[in-house]
Image (tube, helix red, strand yellow):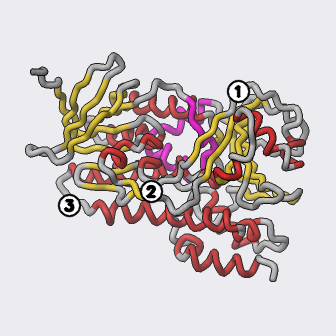
Amino acid sequence: MSEPLQTQSVEILIVGAGPAGSVAAALLRQQGRQVLVIEREQFPRFSIGESLLPQSMAYLEQAGMLRAVVEAGFQFKNGAAFMRNGVYTDFDFRDKHSAGWGTTYQVQRADFDHVLAKEAERFGAEVRYRHEVLDVALEQPDGGSLVTIKDPDGRQYQVKAGFILDASGFGRILPRLLKLETPSNFPVRGAIFTHVEDGISGKTFDRNKIRVTVHPKHCNVWFWTIPFAGGRCSQGVVAETAFLDQYSGTPTERLQAIIAEEPSLHALLANATWDTPARQITGYSANVEKLWGKGYALLGNAGEFLDPVFSSGVTIAFKSASLAAEALRRQFAGETVDWQADFGAPLRKGVDTFRAFVESWYAGGFQQIIFHEHQQPEVKRMIAAILAGYAWDLSNPFVKETSRRLAALESLCTPV
């Protein structure tokens, strides 16, 4: 007969030490809560999602992490640029409808996530690296949930958690274990990506902006170019898997072959040194039945991931962490919390705003808007605000009535 597993108790267990988990941990520690973070990987570790949105800065400030991020020396970012068939347009996030931050950073996520995790530890959260969640049993008879975890040596132990925040990203621990996953309504897309020594010289490229380049023949195929400090950049392509599967060779060779089809991007990277093998991920879009349940909530990508085109992932992660921390503050204070009204619904409002813009991008309508020759300044500022991450600002008509406003603008900008 096997011995019972060693068990310990914690007020709040967070699964994952990425942006959502670390910000949530810092916010909860500021409330005086006992926080344990379980992280499967050893930090620093590679991740994509490197171009932050200015809205993120408010959450870093709220979590007390802003100074550490500023002092890390990441690449300054003030907007987004788009290129299609030789036509260039850009958005300066400082010139936007919504109040708040207009600048941010483009970051190597290995370093950025490590900075945030160390800040969470500075606030008093315990972070256990290379520990893996194996099982979760919700609603124990005496309250809380029982989580089975494996340590780096393969030994198992259990944690009795008063509340669980799943910030496991694409690992999607609770959705998988609790069978919460539902099919995404997006086609199955993939991304091939790498980091390069970009070799870009001259003034033709604004390193303060992410550049999104549309494939010359396929409006639903696009490239990201994210400049980092020190002359490097993240380079990737996103397309439906059937398109990517047409290309043979290593991931690096396939990425280079697709880039060669877009003249402006091919020329921009003519002197690049491809010193890091490319990687591919497929089928990353995800959805769930609900973002919370009795004793748990899903943060960031663990709950829902749309698409990388507007770099919304980290902003949604931070927003979810902020909403969950506030709900838990009230809950621990003895208040009755309606998790749907106070967490699920407000989080989904911004996600749905981003979703409408993502759908319009791939259908081609939003591309017609941003490349239109005669852009109205006030409308451009409203769109800039959403591209800057302010997808929860109901003073913006494109947030308050996203689908209707976007459809009307598409009809105005699309040639008859």
Above or below: residue 306 compared with residue 135: below
Amino acid carrying label 3: it is Thr
Magenta segment includes 229: no
Could you tell me if the residues under marks 1 and 2 are in contact, i.e. CB atoms within 8 Å?
no
Amino acid carrying label 2: it is Asn
Left or right of 135? Residue 110 is right
Say which label, 3 or 2, has the lower sequence index: 2
Q: Which residue is mark 2?
A: 287
Query: Residue 283 location, x and y as percent?
Result: 55, 49
Residue located farthest toward the top when viewing the structure as drawn: 153
Q: Which residue is mark 1?
A: 276
Density class for disc 1 (Cα within 10 Å; few <14, some 14-19, many ≥20) is few
* Magenta-colored span: 46-72
Query: Residue 93 location, x and y as percent?
Result: 68, 56
Q: Residue at x 25, y 44 (%)?
A: 163
Above or below: residue 416 compared with residue 151: below
Density class for disc 3 (Cα within 10 Å; few <14, some 14-19, many ≥20) is few
What is the C-alpha distance between the residues marked 3 and 2?
27 Å
Q: Which residue is mark 3?
A: 336
Query: Residue 308 location, x and y as percent?
Result: 61, 51
